[in-house]
Image (cartoon, rainbow, N blue to C red):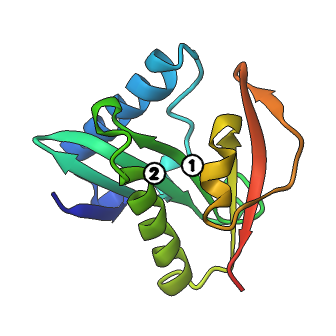
Amino acid sequence: MTWQLKRFEALTADELYNILKERVDVFVVEQACPYPEVDGHDKVAYHLYQEQNGEIIAYLRILPAGSPHPHLSIGRVLVKKNYRGQGMATELLQRALDFIQHELKETMVFIQAQEYLQEFYTSFGFQPISETYLEDHIPHLDMILSME
């Protein structure tokens, strides 16, 4: 299993299909949350993922500042259900932060975290910058990481 990091235009049709399928499976179906998953931001994102047997098992996207948040942001963080609890989310996020800091030379990272994951993100240095709020009926909070 190898990690892939690609811009939108470098994704094959199959890779894009598999990414979107897994995002819908997790964020729309599993979380019973109908919302517009394909939101127009993928075209400017970096897509970090791991595939196994043609399935996306871990994924996140990195969006540049201004799309849609003032700071660079990480979103759509997921690990396929049968791969959770094996440290994959930690490796996924660490790879993303290393890329952001060393390749993109960014020093601030924004994330809209589901509230139950606050401790996980805090372990990387993210700090809450908002109260808890409902987004698509799921408690979230905004968090920021300064890597200066």
Residue 105 percent across, percent down from the top left? 58, 85
| In-image side of 107 versus 43 (left or right) | right
Query: Residue at left 50%, top 86%?
Result: 102
Asked where in the image residue 65 lies, by quadrant, the reply is bottom right
Label 2 CA crowd tier, 10 Å (few <14, some 14–19, many 20+): many
Q: Nearer the viewer, residue 78 or 67?
A: 78
| In-image side of 126 versus 124 (left or right) | right
Label 1 CA crowd tier, 10 Å (few <14, some 14–19, many 20+): some
Q: Which residue is mark 1?
A: 75
Residue 65: mark = none
Image quadrant where one finds the C terminus: bottom right
Residue 101 percent across, percent down from the top left? 55, 81
Toward the right, the furthest residue is: 131
The amino acid sitting under disc 1 is Gly
Q: CA distance from mark 1 to mark 2?
A: 6 Å
Query: Residue at left 66%, top 36%?
Result: 116
The amino acid sitting under disc 2 is Leu
Q: Is residue 37 above or below residue 75?
A: above
Q: Dot 2: what SS?
A: strand
Asked where in the image residue 1 lies, by quadrant, the reply is bottom left
Q: Which residue is mark 2?
A: 60
Q: Nearer the viewer, residue 98 or 67?
A: 98
Q: How many marks?
A: 2
Q: Earlier in the sequence, mark 1 or mark 2?
A: 2
| In-image side of 104 versus 142 (left or right) | left
Q: Are marks 1 and 2 in contact (CB under 8 Å)?
A: yes
Q: Is residue 11 above or below residue 105?
A: above
Q: Dot 1: what SS?
A: strand
Asked where in the image residue 25 lies, by quadrant, the reply is top left
Query: Residue at left 19%, top 62%?
Result: 2
